[in-house]
Amino acid sequence: METWVKICRVADIPRLGARVVKSARGDIAVFRTANDEIFALMDRCPHKAGPLSQGIVHGKRVTCPLHNWVLELADGNALAPDVGCAPTVGAKIDEEDVYLDMPAARTTPVAAE
Amino acid sequence: MLMKTGSKPKLVLIGNGMAGMRTIEEVLKIDANMYDITVFGAEPYGNYNRIMLSPVLAGDKTVDDIMINDTQWYADNGITLHAGKTITRVDRAKCVVEADDGTVEPYDRLLLATGSDPFIIPVPGADLDGVITFRDIHDVNRMMEAAKTKKHAVVIGGGLLGLEAAKGLMIQGMDVTVVHLMDCLMERQLDPMAGGMLRRSLEDQGMKFLMPASTQEILGEDHVTGVRFADGSEIPADIVVMAVGIRPNIKLAQSAGIHCERGVVVNDTMQTFDPRIYAVGECVQHRKQTYGLVAPLFEQARICANHLTERCVLRYLGSVTSTKLKVTGIDLFSAGDFIGSDATEDMTFRDPARNIYKKLVIEENRIKGAVMFGDTVDGAWYFQMMRDGTDISAFRDTILFGKAHLGDSGRGDQNQAMAMADGDEVCGCNGVCKGDIVAAITKNKLYTLDDVRTHTKASSSCGSCTGLVEQLLAATAGGDYSATPKEKPLCKCTDRTHEEVRRVILEQSLKTIPEVMSFLEWSNPDGCASCRPALNYYLLCAWPGEYIDDQQSRFINERAHANIQKDGTYSVVPRMWGGVTNPKELRAIADVADKFDIPTVKVTGGQRIDLLGVKKDDLPAVWADLNAAGLVSGHAYGKALRTVKTCVGSEWCRFGVQDSTRMGVDLEKMCWGTWTPHKVKLAVSGCPRNCAEATIKDFGVVAVDSGWELHVGGNGGMKVRKTDLLCKVKTPEEVLEYCGAYLQLYREEAYYLERTAPWIERVGLESVKQRVVEDAEGRKALYERFLYSQSFSQDDPWAARARQAELQSEFRTLAAV
């Protein structure tokens, strides 16, 4: 079951940029593309844990600032021939608001799980 | 525009050889779904590496080793392969091709890659059984079959192909005589000296030569028995290999009425006179030239694919070629104009005991050609300099001893690629061993340096092992693959070079990154992490005060004005003008370190203090405290002026002859805040003892009694380069003017991420001297442009971020959940 948590306005994230959301699971990088699509990945490159939120965003990809691995924003997979994956976090836009799917941050308990 | 006959336009290739298939591979790389592709090949195989036929004949490789694409590959890529079918007719009116078995195939675009035919000299007996050419797998099989039962082989032709065939037959156990019309072997590649050395080496191995000798008749009833020459002499022969040359195969094109001369005539886009028909490879004639080596064919393939996929940005301008002989035990290299003329000089090196000969043909300090025998490890290096037009005056005295003698700081043994063990590390940055690279080249069929970089990461970081990787590539994939194209595109999003992009920005008054990308038809709509910072810099340099810096196109360090560390924290370096500080500044630094729990405080090599381990969220507060004590950003993170290192000079030092500290502070006040293609470091020494190490800086000033020596183009780092002396000046004002002009020239002409050392090596010290020293007016104009640009850039980025709240969002966490 999805649990959407409102994070910010789309405009709070720079185009072709990212911002960081702190969570119990670790930092989450929330990216905005040139076409105002929003993606979220755990902020750790699968290579050497570099902060992906600090990388350069191009197309639907981000280049890690530490060693230039390129990851797909949609599924977190590294571009071949590199192999690895940054876990994704569900993200959506509703009326210019950005929501993340955060099961751990549920404010009300869900019964019979 | 392409008119479509079906759902997808049809591309038909005639000729399943290296050039044609390379073009198809390039097309697939650009757009795998654009065409329905059909390939016709007269030979009954997939696609194989024809230049490796010699090693097959010599028994070093098998036919399987040299297959490039097997039939499964065609199926996997959705390509229809008609192997063993010869196209007999091209009907240009109906746009169809017909094969000898009756197959008819329509096309929207036709690609001719019919290659070449071996030339058979028209003497009596040339059609006898036992007369063989050396062109395909079938020929190699016939030679190997003959070698099992026959003894005498005669090879007609003492060129590259003939000698490789002769050597292969010798290894197969035959008694081989090479017959050559000229008195020098490989006269199109070698001068008489190298030709003679080659002949003696091959004779030592047991090969026999008859030269100059003109073949008059091949003897025999129905099978070859011997060869008779113009002087009446005869020798016995069981097989005769004709290897006197190749002719472009233009029969099909001619019969279809396509304009041909020696080859199928194409324009710079590889298009024939029929706009639907393109041609590549050995069958082609471009600007009066035909080519028989593989490197030019691959270049043609790349350009042809660019046009077949309607990208239409590349042009073929002809190729400069080099030759290596693929014969075991003989090292031979040749490129360019190796004979020379009245306008050229020869530089030669001979060591008869080691059987080594090297000759460079030089014109105005630039290499025009090279011949090498016995020791060819530096062939690729000379060839690169020849294509780049590198000015060699700085190392003319040692150039013949090779690259290893250039003072490569411990990496000089780059030439021993083959002597390395599989476990030896080639790329120190990424920890890649020789074995990994060789395995990747073999397994993934890699041909270019870029491919190897992508698959192994070797040579993709600092690049100092590039030569070594190229050698491995050449040795593993075949000698002709080593050539990297001279014109390197800016990145994979474009085919334009740095130089072209900079020129177009100015000519077309392009003022934003999207404008540049759309005008130059970038393949990715918002580029990549390589091109965006480069374009941002080029625009900033072209339009000072006007261009609005694109923060999202800057590497994180230049966005955060601090250096990212391996754990995601940052390091902060305040500027200390000329390396001079005081108790107040030191106290402020100590207080900041205490207040923000900064774990490491370290003095840098550039005489600054580095605060390491600062959390990103703390950066604005750290800066505010440092700003309060008068400290500003040291730009230790940027492609910018880093530091001006000084010694104390005449103010204190008993040897000092000028006030080097003052000079350093003044230089730093003038230059700070400038953005440059790469980092820039300066130093000023107060006397020739040079305690500030000014001779390994981008711009180094050394005080002498009568004034100042100005040195340029040095750097420390992985490849140490000592500066070149630019000139001597008298006054501190002149030092500032020359420095500003020099930096502006570097800013305007260097490629992004090119430091001053490789820039000067590329353009030549003379051209820098001419612009900065000799041309006084030009110097003043450069200096003024530098100062004008500086008038917009000297705003402390730390203070700006402390001042403007909206700039701080970069440093704040968005939310916590």
Image (cartoon, coloured by chain):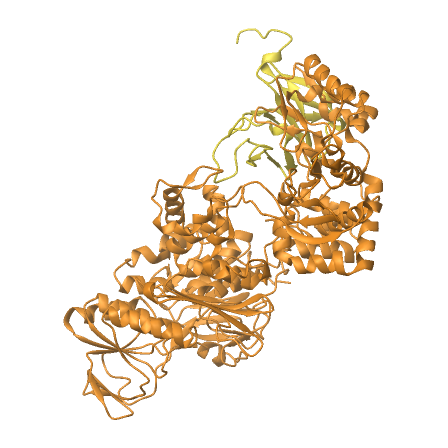
Chain colours: A yellow, B orange
Find residue B597 and report its horizontal and vertical position in percent.
Answer: 66, 14
**Which residue sits furthest left?**
B149
Q: Nearer the viewer, residue B525 or B320?
A: B320
Query: In the figure, residue B109 lies in which quadrant?
Result: bottom right
Foreground residue among B571 and B362: B362
Compared with B293, A81 (above or below) is above
- Tag count in the figure? 0
Q: Residue, x 75% and y 56% (percent of image)?
A: B772
Q: Quadrant of residue A37?
A: top right
Up the image or down, A15 lies above or below B99; here it is above
Can you give x and y, in whole percent of width and height, for residue A14 in the image?
Answer: 73, 31
Q: Which quadrant of the rendered structure holds the N terminus of chain B?
A: bottom right
Quadrant in which residue B259 is drawn? bottom right
Q: Residue furthest front?
A: B654
Residue B724 is at least partly visible in this image = yes
In which quadrant will I find the C terminus of chain B?
top right
Is B476 left, or right, of B285 in this rendering? left
In the image, residue B243 above or below residue B637: below
Specify whether residue B44 is in view.
no
Q: Is residue B325 left or right of residue B169?
A: right
Say whether residue B331 is left or right of residue B281: left
B123 vs B518, nearest the viewer: B123
- Where does residue B213 sit, x and y in percent of width and height? 31, 86
Q: Position of residue B12 (x, y in %)?
A: 48, 64
